[in-house]
Amino acid sequence: MSLAYLAAPRRRLFCVLLVLGFVVANTHQGVRADFVINGFDSADEVAAWAFEGWSTAAATATWDPTVDSLENPASGSMKIEIDFDAAGGKNDANFTRALPAPLDATPAFLFIADIRVAEESPDTPWGDEGYMQIVGRNGNDWTWAPQIADNINSDGTWVAFDKVPAAPFDDLRAITFQLWGGGAQSLQGKTTIWLDNIQFLGDFPEPGQEGDTNGDGVVSIIDLNNVRNNFGAANPPIGDTNGDGEVTIIDLNNVRNNFGAGAPVGVPEPASAALVLCGIASVLLARRNWVAR
């Protein structure tokens, strides 16, 4: 954009007003959140967990709206029933939930889950109720890396498990729950277990951030450029922030009003962003002038 262009009084005023609006709207902190894998608030959430056919013990998973963990009250939980027969080689049950999209889990500092085992479930020779693993599956080959791996000793109460993530998952594809009752565990009979509140604690982008055109969870100069480069387009490949099939002033405002959201710290106004906004202003003025003719 040339200085001569900005020198035009009407255009200069329009650009200044737009940039001032941008400055006022973007002094907030970025929106970040923990990443909840499942709170088991409905039967649909339980249905997302598929029984693995390579399990040696028969098992079922259902939504139980009557049993809630302390951390997630009045929402229900996933109830898993497993028929162990260590003597007959029926030693383990596995359920896997594929994530809707690959997840960069590197911001996580803790992996947590709440577990409860029914009192009437069989015990190991040491008084435990089996060996549990909750496993991250990373990359195209779904590499197996346990996040929580420990003996369970619940006795009918909720037990909170937490662990620093075992691997720097940058391409997490799924989560697998496994309960092992074979070998020295020697479980015999039906185990009933409830699972709830599975999540990564960390600095994750808030999903569905308004103004985010490329799905990275941050509203940045990239999103401004995407709006600018596709402004006025119908069914654009990118730049449509509200799903109406067009890139319009609404999308510009969504980016402007949320600029910096998703960043880990407050985002100051960059000079480049102001220039991009002026560039978009030029697009608007050019279109108005063309229509006037």
Image (spheres, helix red, strand yellow):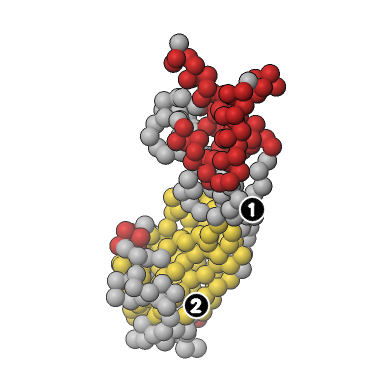
Whether residue 84 is visible, yes or no, is: no
Relative to 15, is 147 above or below? below
Residue 102 is situated, as x and y percent measured from the top left of the image, at: 51, 49
Residue 120 is situated, as x and y percent measured from the top left of the image, at: 34, 86
Q: Which quadrant holds residue 201?
A: bottom right
Whether residue 289 is visible, yes or no, is: yes
Relative to 89, is 210 above or below? above
Circle 2: residue type: Ala
Q: CA distance from mark 1 to mark 2?
A: 34 Å
Circle 1: residue type: Gly
Residue 195 is situated, as x and y percent measured from the top left of the image, at: 41, 71
- Near-viewer residue (5 or 202): 5
Q: Give the residue drawn at x 41%, y 84%.
A: 157
| Quadrant showing the N terminus | top right
Q: Which quadrant holds residue 169?
A: bottom right
Relative to 163, is 49 above or below? above
Residue 112 is situated, as x and y percent measured from the top left of the image, at: 52, 70
Q: Residue furthest top?
A: 293
Q: Give the residue drawn at x 47%, y 61%.
A: 36
| Quadrant showing the C terminus | top left
In front: mark 1 or mark 2?
A: 1
Label 1: few (<14), some (14–19) or many (≥20) C-alpha neighbours in 10 Å: some
Relative to 235, is 191 above or below? below
Q: Give the residue drawn at x 56%, y 40%.
A: 21
- Near-viewer residue (36 or 222): 222
Q: Which mark is residue 266?
A: 1
Looking at the image, residue 274 sits to the left or right of residue 48; the answer is right
Label 2: few (<14), some (14–19) or many (≥20) C-alpha neighbours in 10 Å: some
Q: List the residue tagged with mark 2.
A: 160
Q: Earlier in the sequence, mark 1 or mark 2?
A: 2
